[in-house]
Image (cartoon, rainbow, N blue to C red):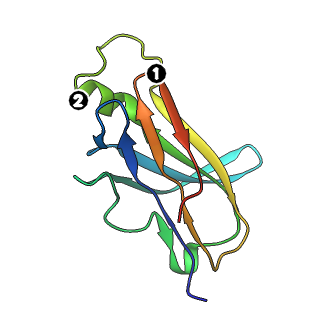
């Protein structure tokens, strides 16, 4: 089995297209402690150019991806400057097997989001 890795992508379900330019931060979570370990943004295909986490840094434990959806929704004309229903979307998840591929996509619209463990 190969080395494990964490990947993600973002799809805009309201417009039916990839969500380009979404900033994403990855945190390692331990109790009440959050330590940022990576930050990137999605490309034109709604994906990151490289895995969010791979290699020696990829380990079992608790993690949190934070998607800065509000910035994207404003930039795409789907939200104004006021308070948003969805702004920063945190997804906390666990990695139990550091040899596997964990894919955590986000499907967003101005008023809903969903995620799942992909492949």
Determine the CA span between mark 2 and mark 1: 14 Å
Q: Residue at x 42, y 12 (%)?
A: 83
Considering only order in the chain, which callout, 1 or 2, is on the residue closer to the N terminus?
A: 2
Q: Place residue 13 in its image quadrant.
A: top left
Q: Where is residue 48 drawn, in percent x and y?
A: 34, 59
Query: Is residue 107 depicted above or below 88 in this figure?
Result: below
State the count of labels. Answer: 2
Q: Place residue 69 in its image quadrant.
A: top left
> Is 77 left, or right, of 58 in this rendering?
left
Q: In the displayed orientation, state which residue is furthest to the bottom.
A: 1
Q: In the displayed orientation, state which residue is furthest to the right.
A: 31
Check disc 1 and report the residue beneath it.
111
Dots 2, 1 in contact, CB < 8 A: no
Element assignment for label 1: loop
Q: How packed is label 1: few (under 14 Cα within 10 Å), some, or many (20 or more)?
A: few
> Is 41 left, or right, of 60 in this rendering?
left
Q: Which mark is residue 17?
A: none
Query: Is residue 116 depicted above or below 38 in this figure?
Result: above
Element assignment for label 2: loop
> Is 99 left, or right, of 87 in this rendering?
right
Q: Where is residue 2 drawn, in percent x and y?
A: 56, 87
Q: Quadrant of the N terminus?
A: bottom right
The residue nearer to you, when weighing 59 against 91, is 91
Q: Where is residue 40 drawn, in percent x and y?
A: 36, 54
Q: Where is residue 6 drawn, in percent x and y?
A: 52, 66
Check disc 2 and report the residue beneath it.
76
Query: Is residue 96 depicted above or below 92 in this figure?
Result: below
Q: Residue at x 59, y 43 (%)?
A: 91
């Amino acid at each position: 089995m190969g080395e494990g890795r964490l990947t993600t992508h973002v799809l805009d379900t309201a417009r039916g297209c990839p969500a380009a330019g979404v900033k994403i931060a990855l945190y390692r979570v331990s109790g009440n402690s959050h330590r940022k370990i990576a930050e990137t943004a999605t490309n034109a295909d709604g994906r990151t150019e490289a895995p969010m986490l791979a290699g020696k840094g990829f380990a079992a434990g608790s993690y949190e991806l934070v998607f800065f959806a509000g910035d994207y929704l404003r930039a795409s004309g789907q939200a104004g400057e006021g308070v948003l229903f969805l702004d920063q979307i945190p997804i906390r998840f666990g990695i139990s097997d550091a040899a596997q591929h964990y894919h955590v996509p986000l499907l967003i619209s101005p008023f809903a989001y969903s995620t799942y463990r992909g492949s």
